[in-house]
Image (tube, grey):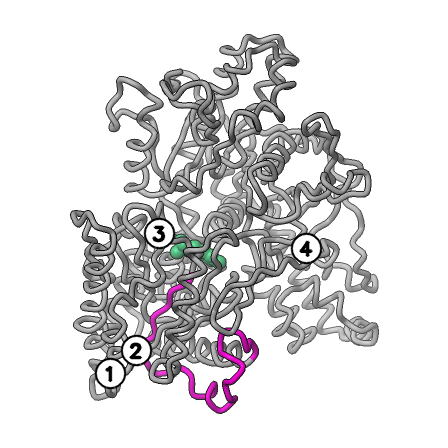
């Protein structure tokens, strides 16, 4: 069945029709020729909007007419469009795999981070999902993705003068984004006896379709329309309503769309109700017993857990479950306690809250954490579900996250990698060629990124009076940051365990380091705290207040309203990427991988991916003081260790220059990092592992993994 899409409101003259295809396929976001084409249409508009759909929407008719008359442009357009068609149809890695049982994968995620123009993510989990789709597209893996369309996205961050975070919830217009409404498909669900419907939008991510459910339709009452209002918003009642739509609604949407995946992959537990939907169908529709249905649902179901932090896992109280699933259990003819037990650990008691991760583990054939260390932590954490087994024997493996290279490296670095590694560097298994790069060339790439970052910081500070302070004079902002100084980046969600303020446990020492004579250090921060996270908001305020000090303000900045665009600027422009979580709470951490592909050196606690990929030749490991029981003392010590590294290793090595002004030993490390980390941190490696180690084995019935105990 082919899906009928509503025509976009965007209208262009007939000869320019291929532009619409190019704008609505997000492949443009990682493809040079397409970006070049859009830049050519309106260079200034491209710089400010950075998004083809908005660009075309804002174009005056006279410009469109001029393009039609521009033969050279039209010829180029045809060529670029043919490139897209080739990409969409060419066989790739997956097509070369004989005898696979994999028909298609349905990939469910509560958030997707694909481009700044589609703000449907809060952080690493969503961006990872976006990178998974992009890499799956490149590898030709048959995959269809499912999520929700949040009408306000996450939130936009504004800082008050003293750095207190305020949240704004803009109303996004799907018609202005790279989304098209699917005609004639609607999803009906009863939420506590109230019928609610959703419409479905489609985004194209190369060859991978992404379907987003949206309850903001006239049929629904006000309450129902708000189900998909914003990501990670509201109370527990709101969350369960969203998750029912994501999981159960998602399965119904796939059916209505004519998709018949045989693998269901739940990216984190929020989409876990997808398994209940399938369970109910087998019991009611095919007459299977509950136990038989559980066994059937597990086949082909894959669950990836992303966090050892309790707050990251949804737990729904029993009365809430009763409200939304009481009828469901009646229809299935099973006792309500049987459903609850799916989300409870043995011995917890019948009133324990329903844990989405427990259910997901019970209803999947394969489960994994997102780094080797996180796999190990997860096996211990979930061991109570398998009574009588030691943690080692808990069937949770790991697939270390990776990142979609072309989406994150600078144009200069892309060119360099093409020249010295391989024209298809993102898929190359060996990066040995990087050692041939002349130092001058690599340093020029770094300098270009740093310069761009410094200009960006100045522009943003000048434009956002909140963080910079309205008292700031423009000439002052002009002097913020130094394009030649050692630049440290730190940007991610401001969750407490990520410890954005670790550096500031010793403020005087930090201040002195920032102002080391002739060898300055500068640090750029960015990130949002969840609206309910007071601790995270306090951390932001602490940083902003500290950066206000006249002795510090030229060397430390906080960039408001973190998003993919800010992130990219930081990954491409920093010299060092800082990551100092409370070990082992960072399941993987992918920002350091994106930095690494830009030859930015990681300085990190040995947590997540860094715990398995660190070696002295590629960066620095901040010692963690896990033996210290008192958290304040532990923070103090780890902060001290971090500042020691900055003072005794980063500063001397970065400023050690030869006669030609190059930091030869620093450059050696940059090349080491590219050579040794490049092939391992990319998402193509990750998606191949998911296919070979998770998806295909989840379909093989011969060796079912033992189910958790009841
Ligand atoms: C990669 C990425 C992250 C993840 O950062 P961590 O260090 O893994 O927490 C968060 N936000 C954005 C926008 C990203 O691109």
* Residue under label 1: 516
* Residue 178 - label: 4
3 vs 1, front mark: 3
The answer to whether 266 is drawn above or below residue 408 in the figure is: above
Camera-side residue: 656 or 327?
327
Mark 1 or mark 3, which is nearer the start of the sequence? 3
Q: Quadrant of ligand 1?
A: bottom left
Horizontal placement of 565 versus 383: left or right?
Answer: right
Crowd around label 1: few <14 · some 14–19 · many ≥20 (10 Å): few
The label nearer to you, 3 versus 2, is: 3
Q: List x then y, in percent, for residue 621.
A: 22, 58
Q: Which residue is mark 2?
A: 521
Magenta segment boundaries in residue numbering: 463-491
**Relative to 633, does residue 231 appear above or below in the rendering?**
above
Whether residue 314 is visible to the viewer of this picture, yes or no, is yes
Helix, strand or loop under label 4: loop
Q: Are marks 3 and 2 in contact (CB under 8 Å)?
A: no
Residue appearing at x 65%, y 14% in the figure: 331
Ligand 1: does it lie within 8 Å of the C-beta at label 1?
no
C-alpha span from label 3 to label 2? 25 Å
Q: Secondary structure at mark 2?
A: strand
Q: Earlier in the sequence, mark 2 or mark 1?
A: 1
Residue 528 position, x and y percent, is: 48, 59
Upstream in the sequence, badge 4 or badge 2?
Answer: 4
Question: Measuring 35% from the left and 52% from the top, which residue is drawn there?
Answer: 497
Quarter of the image where the N terminus is located: top right
Q: Is residue 482 magenta?
A: yes
- Tell me which numbered mark, 3 or 2, is placed earlier along the sequence: 3
State yes or no: discs 2 and 1 in contact (Cβ < 8 Å): yes
């Amino acid at each position: 069945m082919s899906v009928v899409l509503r025509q976009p409101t965007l209208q262009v003259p007939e000869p320019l029709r291929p532009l619409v295809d190019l704008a609505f396929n997000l492949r443009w976001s990682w493809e040079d020729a397409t970006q070049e084409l859009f830049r050519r249409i309106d260079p200034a508009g491209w710089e400010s909007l950075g998004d083809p759909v908005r660009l075309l929407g804002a174009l005056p008719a006279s410009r469109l007419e001029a393009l039609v008359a521009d033969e050279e442009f039209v010829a180029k357009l045809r060529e670029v469009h043919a490139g897209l068609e080739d990409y969409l149809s060419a066989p790739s890695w997956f097509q070369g795999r004989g005898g696979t049982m994999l028909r298609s994968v349905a990939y469910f995620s509560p958030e997707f981070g694909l481009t700044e123009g589609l703000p449907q993510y809060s952080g690493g989990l969503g961006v990872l999902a976006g990178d998974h789709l992009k890499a799956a597209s490149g590898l030709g893996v048959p995959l269809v993705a499912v999520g929700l369309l949040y009408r306000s996205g996450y939130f936009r961050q504004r800082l008050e003068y003293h750095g207190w975070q305020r949240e704004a919830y803009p109303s996004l217009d799907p018609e202005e984004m790279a989304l098209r409404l699917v005609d004639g498909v609607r999803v009906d669900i009863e939420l506590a006896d109230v019928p609610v419907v959703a419409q479905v939008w489609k985004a194209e991510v190369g060859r991978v379709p992404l379907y987003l459910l949206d309850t903001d339709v006239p049929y629904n009452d006000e309450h129902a329309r708000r189900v998909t209002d914003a990501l990670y918003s509201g109370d527990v009642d709101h969350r369960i309503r969203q998750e029912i739509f994501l999981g159960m609604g998602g399965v119904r949407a796939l059916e209505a769309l004519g998709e018949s995946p045989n693998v269901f992959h739940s990216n984190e537990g929020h989409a876990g109700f997808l398994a209940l939907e399938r369970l109910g169908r087998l019991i009611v529709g095919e007459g299977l017993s509950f136990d038989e249905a559980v066994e059937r649902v597990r086949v082909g179901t894959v669950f990836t857990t992303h966090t050892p932090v309790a707050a990251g896992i949804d737990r729904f109280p029993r009365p809430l479950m009763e409200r939304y699933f009481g009828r469901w259990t009646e229809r299935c003819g099973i006792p309500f306690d049987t459903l609850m037990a799916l989300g409870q650990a043995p011995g917890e008691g019948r009133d324990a809250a329903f844990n989405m991760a427990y259910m997901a583990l019970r209803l999947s054939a394969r489960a994994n954490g997102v780094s080797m260390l996180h796999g190990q932590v997860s096996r211990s954490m979930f061991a109570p579900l398998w009574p009588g087994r030691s943690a080692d024997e808990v069937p949770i493996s790991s697939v270390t996250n990776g990142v979609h290279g072309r989406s994150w490296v600078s144009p200069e670095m892309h060119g360099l990698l093409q020249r010295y590694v391989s024209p298809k560097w993102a898929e190359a298994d060996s990066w040995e060629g990087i050692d041939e790069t002349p130092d001058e060339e690599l340093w020029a790439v770094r300098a270009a990124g740093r310069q761009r970052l410094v200009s960006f910081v100045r522009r943003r500070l000048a434009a956002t009076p909140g963080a910079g302070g309205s008292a700031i004079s423009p000439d002052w902002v002009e002097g913020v940051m130094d394009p030649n100084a050692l630049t440290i980046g730190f940007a991610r969600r401001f969750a407490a365990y990520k410890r954005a303020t670790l550096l500031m446990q010793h403020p005087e020492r930090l201040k002195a380091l920032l102002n080391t004579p002739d060898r300055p250090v500068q640090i750029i921060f960015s990130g949002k705290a969840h609206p309910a996270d007071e601790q995270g908001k306090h951390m932001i305020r602490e940083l902003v207040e500290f950066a206000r000090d006249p002795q510090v303000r030229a060397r430390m900045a906080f960039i408001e309203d973190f998003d993919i665009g800010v992130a990219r600027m930081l990954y491409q422009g920093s010299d060092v990427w800082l990551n100092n979580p409370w070990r082992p709470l960072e399941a993987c951490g992918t920002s350091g991988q994106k930095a690494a592909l830009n030859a930015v050196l990681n300085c990190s606690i040995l947590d997540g991916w860094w715990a398995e990929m660190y070696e002295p030749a590629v960066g620095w490991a901040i010692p963690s003081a896990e033996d210290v029981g008192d958290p304040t003392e532990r923070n103090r010590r780890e902060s001290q260790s971090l500042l020691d590294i900055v003072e005794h290793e980063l500063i001397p090595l970065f400023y050690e220059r030869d006669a030609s002004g190059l930091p030869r030993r620093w450059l050696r490390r940059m090349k080491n990092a590219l050579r040794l980390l490049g092939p391992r941190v990319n998402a193509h490696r990750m998606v191949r592992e998911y296919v070979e180690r998770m998806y295909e084995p989840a379909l093989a019935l011969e060796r079912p993994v033992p189910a958790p105990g009841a």
